[in-house]
Image (cartoon, grey):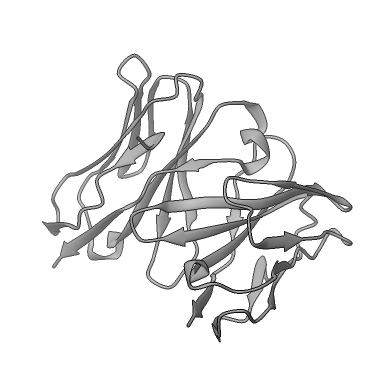
Amino acid sequence: NAGVTQTPKFQVLKTGQSMTLQCAQDMNHEYMSWYRQDPGMGLRLIHYSVGAGITDQGEVPNGYNVSRSTTEDFPLRLLSAAPSQTSVYFCASRRTGDSPLHFGNGTRLTVT
Amino acid sequence: QKEVEQDPGPLSVPEGAIVSLNCTYSNSAFQYFMWYRQYSRKGPELLMYTYSSGNKEDGRFTAQVDKSSKYISLFIRDSQPSDSATYLCAMSPGRSWQGGKLIFGQGTELSVKP
């Protein structure tokens, strides 16, 4: 039981490049979400999904795209990377009801 | 002004000390309050959660919520070097934790020295 798996662990991009951050969970959780963590800002919600085929925006969605074609996977796409997107990105999932969020170990992204 | 404010520290204490970590918030609709612990280079993990006002104890950890003052605290008794981590408070306005739409504090970095 791997929990929430994020790949890659580290990534360096040039401004304007696009990429996809992968997130997979093997706990059959309905809910999945993406957060970014920046110094002094805490964790901020980017996008979330309450089930396959359903996604919605969080607090800071601009510049990011998501889709949820399966229960297990929730990839985050950076359409045209900008230095302001340099951050640590965390994927999290949980089952429905009053249950805690389970976080992955993050992807550290640098945009130059 | 942020909805949730947390002193980022860093906080350094000797082993065995009592540690007090605090958050204040502005949204009176918050009902669920959580504390996450985050070790370096890892994702946050849930430590404790409480609903509405009151205290909750789990081993060396006590979570306290004062909704009248919009203030929550986490106390760690007999602190250990293994408690060295960043502690994040988080809160949510509704049941089912609003699908995980938690509002997080900035996190407090704690170091417990042997």
x, y percent for residue A65: 73, 61
- Work out which residue is located at the far front of the displayed protein and give it: A16
Count the labels in the image. Answer: 0
Residue at (38%, 37%) from the top-left corner? B2
Q: As displayed, is residue B50 above or below residue B13?
A: above
In screen coordinates, is B72 left or right of A68? left
Q: Position of residue A37 (x, y in %)?
A: 46, 60
Q: Is residue B89 above or below residue A112?
A: above
- Residue B39 coordinates in the image, percent (x, y): 39, 66
Q: Quadrant of residue B4?
A: top left
Extreme residue in the left direction: B14
Quarter residue A90 falls in = bottom right
Residue A106 placed where, x, y %? 54, 70
| Residue B107 versus residue A108 in the image, above or below | above
In the image, A2 versus A37, the foreground residue is A37
Q: What residue is rendered at 41% in x and 34% in y?
A: B3
Quick one: quadrant of the N terminus of chain A?
bottom right
> Residue drawn 84% across and 58% down?
A71
| For residue A60, side relative to residue B46 (left or right) | right
* Residue at (69% x, 47% y) in the render: A57
Q: Is residue A98 above or below residue A1?
A: above
Left/right of residue A53 with respect to residue B76 in the rendered view:
right
| In front of the other: A15 or A60 | A15
